[in-house]
Amino acid sequence: MHVLEGHEKILSFLALTAQNDRPAHAYLFSGREGVGKKLVALRFACFLNCPSPTDADYSCSTCTRMVEGKHPDIRITLPEKNMIRIDKVREIQSVLRYAPVECRYRVVIIDDAHLMNRSAQNALLKTLEEPPNYSILILISSRPSLMLPTVRSRCRKVRFGSLSTESVVRILRDNGIAPGEAGVLARLASGSAGRALKMESSQYMKLREKVIAVLSHSDSVGLRGALEFSATISSDRATAIQAIEIASTWIRDLLLEQIGTHSSEMIHVDFLDKISDTAHRQDSDRLISLYDQLVRAAELIEAEINVNPNLVTDTMMLKTLRILEGPHFGVVPANG
């Protein structure tokens, strides 16, 4: 089952835990977004509660309803408006007052647990400290450092690594994406199948083509064209992040080309001619510095720290083009 591949060791550990009837009362599943943490959590719920655990595909009615979130003994809590408030934790605690309806364990999954506000996390501590013996809590987070240390310390930690490019390609192919596009998306997603599936849209691929067109033909685009393009992408925070990330991966490919890396290690393999033409005209040290700045810019916008996406995008657009085309790009010469 491709949606679970890449985490075989974790699945084996969780299956053995369930078989030996020694689960912890709380787990923290951490790792980057889109690598399958929630899917594994749902499979763990099946390991714990399947009435026919020797059935390898876990396709019984109990498991099917658990995976679909329709079983009375499983509860999935999601953020609302980018936050999990104390009332959601109170609801969880209310549910856990009662023994399971059908199964041995009542499983509660809190997705994006780092989005619990401080009050919610403090309220959850009581449940973590005095859990009912029939309850299993699974906290899922891509940013566990934002959670209270007291919450993290009361959970058994399970760390998820990134998926291999080959695994992401297989997952994308299973979702009906053509081989060529699946390969590009898998490399762009850097080990996150969920991210690759989100990117699988004509809008994203068109954005990628536009960013690369501006970066590889900046002399013909000109300063005005570059800033107009920057204005169109910076009006939406998510689009601004995507555009800057595309630019950073483009710079990465230029650096790989400079040191003679095989194209299989590159992301934008369908633009090899443009990469080759551009790379050998650039200074490596300046490209490395630019790459670091682009990565940092995307992180700042994503973290929603007090930054103006328009200003950051315009600044990085000019920095990038002045490194690729020279410091005089966009400078109007003085008359006379």
Image: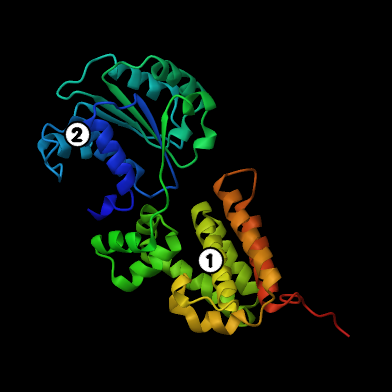
Q: For this rendering, which residue is in front, 221 or 113? A: 113
Residues at badges 1 and 2 in contact (C-beta under 8 Å)?
no
Q: Residue at x 33, y 41 (%)?
A: 38
Q: Which residue is mark 2?
A: 70
At label 2, the amino acid type is Lys
Q: For this rendering, which residue is in front, 324 or 99? A: 99
Q: Secondary structure at mark 2?
A: loop
Q: Residue at x 39, y 65 (%)?
A: 185
Q: CA distance from mark 1 to mark 2?
A: 41 Å
Q: Which residue is mark 1?
A: 249
Badge 1 or badge 2: first in the primary sequence: 2
Mark 2: few/some/many CA within 10 Å (<14, 14-19, 20+): some
Q: Residue at x 39, y 17 (%)?
A: 127
Position of residue 327 measured from the top left corner of the image (x, y, whole percent): 75, 74
Position of residue 7 measured from the top left corner of the image (x, y, whole percent): 33, 48
Q: Secondary structure at mark 1?
A: helix
Q: For this rendering, which residue is in front, 248 or 212? A: 248
Q: Which labelled disc corresponds to residue 5? A: none
At label 1, the amino acid type is Thr
Position of residue 278 measured from the top left corner of the image (x, y, whole percent): 60, 81
